[in-house]
Amino acid sequence: MTPDQALRFASTFDKLAVNISQAVLGKPVAVRLVLTALFAEGHVLLEDTPGTGKTLLARALAATVDSTHNRIQFTPDLLPSDVTGTEIYNQKTGDFSYHRGPVFASIVLADEINRASPKTQSALLEVMEESQVTVDGKAHHVGRPFMVIATQNPIEQAGTYPLPEAQLDRFLIKTSIGFPDIAATVDILSGAAIRDRSAAIKPIISGAEAAKMAEMAATVHLEPAVLEYIARLAEATRTAAETRVGVSVRGGVALVRAARVLAAAQGRHYLIPDDVKALVGPVWAHRLILHPEVEFEGVTAESVLGRVLSQVPAPKERA
């Protein structure tokens, strides 16, 4: 990536963020994190209580990127074939034909994903990792861009199933939206007659342009010292006394991908340690598995990552 390309990337990124923020008021951090995942070609898990705008954020992103999008409402009776599609027998021809499921879209909203059974949740594993669905030995590609935005209610709520660790690891970023501040709440209430704020959003870029921006972000320059810094942070999470399972190599790769997008979104064609620090929480917190006894004591993944960041020295930034 050249400096001029980085500036153009940042300009487009800002326009997209402003466009989405017309629907999702007062949540610029969550908006930029979702866009970061889009251009890092990753997936996002939004965990929050009902009514905080999780679905609205996903719809606003789908409206901003002019491409196909589908919504899947996860319920206890949802079957894996309802997500991925199935082979259907044609009596006239005597052959089976594959009918694609709703997962075949550029942006897929998996709403309340943890209300479905673990078997149905696992139907997303292959397509989230490899962007394809295999049925009867045949691979069906979903194309690019492809992004899953899953929403889940806190697991303490009735009728929820916790996501297995293998599926949590497929999400590039996990974040929450939270309740808006007073000023944003007043703006929302003043427009209470508008049932869907995302309906008024106009597309800014096409799906093909989003894919090109993802390719451009992947060319952000990486200094060996910054890569070593990420490796040391990951190692520190694995040796921390509070963790049963630390960050995997997949988690390290995910952080590099996301940090590259963040650097480009700030108009830089190279990565700096601050890009890494800014994304350690959203990219790594859901990948840590803590010992039950320390969780009872109130220790969180975020607090462990905060201590790791304070203990592992960051390399000096380039001049």
Image (cartoon, grey):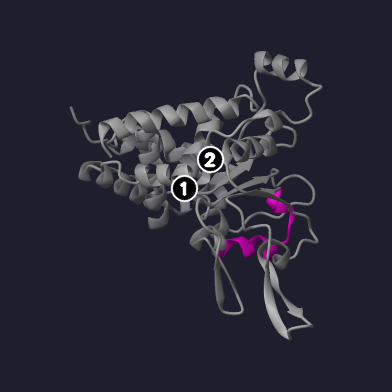
Q: Neighbour class for label 1 at 10 Å: few (<14), some, many (≥20)? A: many
Q: In the image, what residue type sits under mark 1? A: Glu
- Measuring from the top left, give residue 295's x and y in whole percent: 57, 45
Q: In the image, what residue type sits under mark 2? A: Val
- Measuring from the top left, give residue 262's x and y in whole percent: 40, 35
Count of marks placed on residues: 2
Which quarter of the figure is the C terminus placed in? top left
User: Is residue 120 magenta-colored?
Assistant: yes
Where 133 sits versus 260, above or below? below
* Residue linked to disc 1: 242
Element type where label 2 sits in the image? loop
Q: Answer with left or right where residue 200 lies relative to residue 127.
A: right
Which quarter of the figure is the N terminus placed in? top left
* Frontmost residue, 255 versus 165: 255
> Residue visible at 61% across and 61% down?
124
Are circles 1 and 2 on residues that touch, CB within 8 Å?
yes
- Measuring from the top left, give residue 229's x and y in whole percent: 28, 43
| Chain-order first, disc 1 or disc 2 | 1
> Residue visible at 35% across and 43% down?
216
> Residue visible at 61% across and 21% down?
26
Range of magenta residues: 112-126
Where 215 sits versus 176, above or below? below
- Magenta part, dominant SS: helix
- Measuring from the top left, give residue 292's x and y in whole percent: 57, 51
* Residue linked to disc 2: 299
> Residue visible at 41% across and 33% down?
278
Which residue is at the far bottom? 94
Residue at mark 1 to residue at mark 2: CA–CA distance: 8 Å
Element type where label 1 sits in the image? loop
Which quadrant would residue 279 be assigned to in this image? top left
User: Is residue 155 magenta-colored?
Assistant: no
